[in-house]
């Protein structure tokens, strides 16, 4: 099983972050929030951090995952599972691919 795990190239990592950004933007828009509105919900000093995330740059700090999930109207467990898929694809594969295949 471990031999089947594939490492991501830098280009693939960049693509994953871009895809993550689109997903995050879709969640925000589904809640009817502007970037500034979401920043306010999260008590962020700068809404530009959200823009950076939506453009595939940066990461949500792990200690704030639950806050982000709540602000975006998401179940925290599902939200973090999706974050893990984008942020740590090898870890995600180890934890979940066997479950999803079976």
Image (cartoon, rainbow, N blue to C red):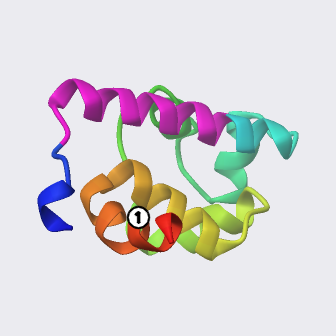
Front in this rendered view, residue 94 or 27: 94
Mark 1 Cα-neighbour bin, 10 Å: few <14, some 14–19, many ≥20: some
**Residue 65 falls left or right of residue 1:** right
The correct choice, above or below, for 14 with respect to 65 in the image is: above
The correct choice, above or below, for 70 with respect to 46 in the image is: below
State the predominant SS element of the stretch in magenta: helix
Q: What element carries label 1?
A: helix
Residue 85 locus on image (x, y percent): 42, 55
Residue for point 31% across, 53% down: 89
- The number of numbered badges drawn on the structure is 1
Residue for point 61% across, 42% down: 24
Front in this rendered view, residue 101 or 96: 101
Return the residue found at the far left.
3
Residue 39 locus on image (x, y percent): 64, 47
9 inside magenta stretch? yes
4 inside magenta stretch? no
Q: Quadrant of the N terminus?
A: bottom left
Return the residue found at the far front.
102
Q: Looking at the rendering, which quadrant does residue 67 occupy? A: bottom right
The correct choice, above or below, for 68 with respect to 98 in the image is: above
Q: Name the residue under label 1.
A: 97
**Residue 40 falls left or right of residue 92:** right
Q: Looking at the rendering, which quadrant does residue 10 occupy? A: top left
Q: Is residue 40 something one can see in this rendering? A: yes
The correct choice, above or below, for 84 with respect to 48 in the image is: below
Residue for point 52% across, 66% down: 100
Q: Specify start and end residues of the magenta stretch as a single range.
A: 8-25
Residue for point 25% across, 58% down: 90
Q: Is residue 48 something one can see in this rendering? A: no
**Residue 20 falls left or right of residue 39:** left
């Amino acid at each position: 099983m471990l031999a089947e795990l594939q490492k991501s190239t830098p280009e693939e990592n960049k693509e994953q972050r871009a895809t993550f950004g689109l997903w995050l933007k879709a969640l925000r828009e589904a809640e009817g929030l502007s970037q500034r509105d979401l920043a306010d919900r999260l008590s962020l000093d700068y809404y530009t951090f959200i823009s950076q995330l939506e453009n595939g740059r940066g990461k949500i700090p792990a200690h704030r995952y639950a806050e982000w999930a709540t602000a975006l109207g998401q179940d925290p467990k599902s939200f973090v599972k999706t974050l893990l898929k984008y942020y740590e694809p090898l870890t995600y594969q180890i934890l979940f691919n066997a479950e999803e295949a079976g």
